[in-house]
Image (cartoon, rainbow, N blue to C red):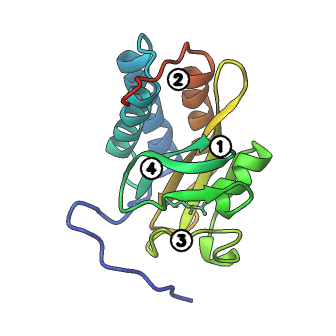
């Protein structure tokens, strides 16, 4: 059954799938680029924006990629690349809210199979599949969830989970983190 989609802005391309071998090669490249660029940095926003950019550069099925940060017991949108992201998500709501509550990675092969507005929040109708992972700091405190959408169904699997868990652990759980106070 086809689902409603919307025209993609000029700067967004539809997702393009990769074979398992191509995925592993791309993730190996991504992991070493992120390490080279950010291993000696501490600023959490700097790490988040750099991780989004490097992943979206090397993985053509990444339609939307970004962080939802924990703020006062709920989630607010943080650094991301893609079409407009929802601003606020409650714990337990959508895939992001469920991961914030369970602190466990979720892979969704077909977002349209979920109850919209409850189990899934559609910020963009072009999103077809999704992976969301918890992000912990060195004190094992949940600081955010990391969300990736594809405009193709069944885009994410154990390879994505394996490498993304490694990258998030090295970047946030095994690092001293600081946050530049803007105000
Ligand atoms: N689909 C997510 C919301 C965020 S958008 O994908 C950017 C969810 O269900 O939680």
Q: Which mark is residue 41?
A: none
- Residue at image position (70%, 77%) is 115
**Residue 58 x, y percent position in the rendering:** 35, 42
Spatial CA distance of label 1 from label 4 is: 23 Å
Of labels 3 and 1, the one closer to you: 1
Judging by the rendered image, the residue that carries numbered circle 3 is 122
Spatial CA distance of label 4 from label 3 is: 14 Å
Q: Is the CB–ligand 1 distance for label 3 below 8 Å?
A: yes
Judging by the rendered image, the residue that carries numbered circle 1 is 72
Judging by the rendered image, the residue that carries numbered circle 2 is 171
Q: Residue 65 carries which label?
A: 4
Of labels 1 and 4, the one closer to you: 1
Q: What element carries label 3?
A: loop
Q: Which of marks 4 and 3 is nearer the N terminus?
A: 4
**Residue 148 x, y percent position in the rendering:** 51, 52
Q: Which residue lies furthest to the left in this view?
A: 10
Q: What element carries label 4?
A: strand
Between residue 38 and residue 2, name the one nearer to us: 38
- Residue at image position (58%, 64%) is 154
């Amino acid at each position: 059954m086809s689902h409603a989609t919307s025209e993609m802005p000029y700067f967004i391309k539809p997702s393009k799938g990769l074979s398992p071998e191509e995925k592993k090669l791309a993730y190996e490249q991504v992991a070493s680029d992120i390490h080279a660029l950010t291993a000696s940095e501490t600023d959490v926003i700097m790490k988040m924006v750099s991780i989004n950019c490097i992943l979206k550069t090397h993985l053509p099925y990444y339609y939307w990629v970004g962080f939802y940060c924990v703020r006062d017991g709920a989630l607010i949108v943080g650094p991301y690349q893609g079409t407009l992201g929802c601003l606020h998500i409650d714990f337990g709501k959508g895939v992001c809210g469920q991961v914030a509550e369970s602190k466990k990675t979720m892979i969704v092969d077909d977002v349209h199979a979920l109850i919209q507005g409850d189990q899934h929040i559609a910020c963009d109708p072009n999103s077809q599949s999704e992976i969301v992972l918890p992000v912990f700091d060195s004190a094992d405190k949940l600081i955010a969830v990391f969300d990736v959408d594809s405009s193709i169904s069944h885009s994410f699997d154990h390879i994505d989970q394996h490498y993304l868990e490694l990258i998030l652990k090295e970047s946030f759980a095994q690092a001293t983190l600081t946050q530049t106070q803007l105000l």
